[in-house]
Amino acid sequence: MTTDQQTNALSAARANDPHAFDALILSSFGGPEGQEDVIPFLRNVTRGRGIPDERLEEVATHYRANGGVSPINAQNRALRDALEGELRGRGIDLPILLANRNWDPYVADVLRQCHASGYKDLLVLATSAYSGYSSCRQYREDYGVGLEETGLQDELHVEKIRQYYDSEGFLRPYAGKLRDSLLALRERTDGALRVLFTTHSVPMTDANAAGPQRMSFEGDSAYVAQHLAAARWIVEQVGEPMDGVEWELVYQSRSGPPQVPWLEPDICDIIEGLPEKDVTGVAVVPLGFVSDHMEVLWDLDTEACEAAAAAGLEFERIPTAGTDPDFVAALADLVEQRLGTPTAPPRISACAQGTWFDTCAPDCCVKVLRGQSEPRPTIAQRPVGEPIPVGLDENGEVIRR
C-alpha cells in the first residue's frame, strides 16, 4: 500500500457516515460591537475566574483603541457570506447561521432559532483549525451545554466539522503570502531573515491534554504537533525564498497568573533577541488564527511590530486566511464531505498521516484544571470505551486501541 493509500485509509477510518444536515452554524469566539459592550464581553470571557473590572479594563484598552469593536464579528459575517456563495455555486443550498461563545448571537439562542425554523440536523464549523480545549472541545461543550440549557437534546442533532489545520486550502494562502513577505524583506535588507510562525499560547496542562491521551504526538501535544506540521508544509511550499532562512514556532496572547506554566517562547521575547543572532528582518505568520481579529491586530500589528522596531528589525506580518478563495473552497469541501454529496472531494491531509476525527474520544482535549467533579455535556464524542482508530500497521491496516 502506498503512502497516499495509507493516508486515505486512515482518513476514511476517522470519518463519520454522510448525513443530510438542515443548516450549518459558523461558530466563533465573538467580540464587542461598541464601547459599552467591552466590559460585559470580557466578563463573559473570564466568567468564573473572579477577575475584577479594574483588571479587565487593562485588557479593554485593546478594544477601546479600536472603537470598542472587535473585528472578528464583521470578519465572520464576511466568511459566512463567502461560504454561502461558494456552496451555492456548487448547487448546495444550506442555510448558514452565526453563533458565538462570548457575545450575541449566543449558542443557546441560535439553537432555539434553528428549532423554531425547523432545522433539526445541525453541522457546526468552528473558526479554529487546531486540536485543543479552547480550539475544539470547548466548542463541543458549548453545544452540549446549549442543548441542555434549551431542553432540545431530543429535538436537535448536532455534529461538528473536524479540525482542518491540514487542509491544503487553509495552508496555501499562508505559503503564498509568506513568499511575498520574504521577497519584500529582501528588498529592504541584505541581512539574515527569520520566520516566526505564531499561535495562541495555552496552559501547559491544556497543551499536553490536546488530542486523545492514547496517542503520541510531537512535543507531547496534538496542538503543538499540528502547528509544527502545518509550518513545515508551508516552508516547503515557499521554496527558494526560504533558502538560508531559519524559522520557529512561537506563542502569543498569554494570560493568567504567572505561576501557571504556558507554552513558550513568547513572540516578543524572541524578536528582542534576534539582533544578537545577526537577524535584520522578521516575517510573522499568524498560523494559529483564521482571521485578522483583535489578537492579531493588537498582539502582532502593535506589540510585536513595536518590539521589532525597538530591535531595529524590518518587519512583515502576513495576513491570515480570512476569506481567501482557497480557504473558503476548503471549508466548502469539508461541508461536502460531511453531507456526502456526489461531488465531495476525498479526505486528504496535506501534512499529517490522516485527517482528524469527525467524532472525538472522551479523553480528547480535556480541561485538566477545571476542578469539576462532573464533565460538561459534549457533542461529537464517542461513547466511553468505544475504540478509536489511531494508526496504521505495516500493511496499511487501521489499528484501533
Image (cartoon, grey):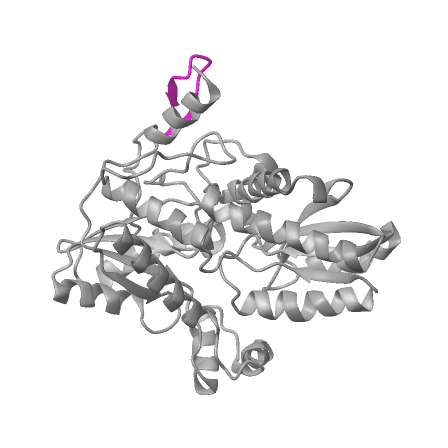
- In this image, 307 relative to 191: left or right? left
**98 relative to 139, above or below:** below
Residue 285 lies in quadrant:
bottom right
State the residue at coordinates (23%, 39%): 340
Whether residue 388 appears in this view of the structure is: no
State the residue at coordinates (19%, 68%): 113
- Label tally: 0
Whether residue 303 appears in this view of the structure is: yes
State the residue at coordinates (88%, 54%): 276
- Viewer-proximal residue, 257 or 334? 334
- Viewer-proximal residue, 111 or 355? 355
Q: Magenta segment: does it hold 399?
A: yes
- Viewer-proximal residue, 14 or 54? 14
Most extreme residue toward the bottom is 36
- In this image, 9 relative to 314: left or right? left
State the residue at coordinates (78%, 62%): 314
Give coordinates of residue 166: x percent, y percent: 48, 41
**350 relative to 75, above or below:** above
Magenta segment boundaries in residue numbering: 388-401
Instruction: Give the quadrant of the N terminus.
Output: top left
Instruction: Give the quadrant of the C terminus.
Output: top left
Q: Magenta segment: does it hold 332?
A: no
**160 relative to 314, above or below:** above
Give coordinates of residue 106: x percent, y percent: 31, 69
- In this image, 318 relative to 291: left or right? right
Residue 198 lies in quadrant:
bottom right
Give coordinates of residue 369: x percent, y percent: 49, 53
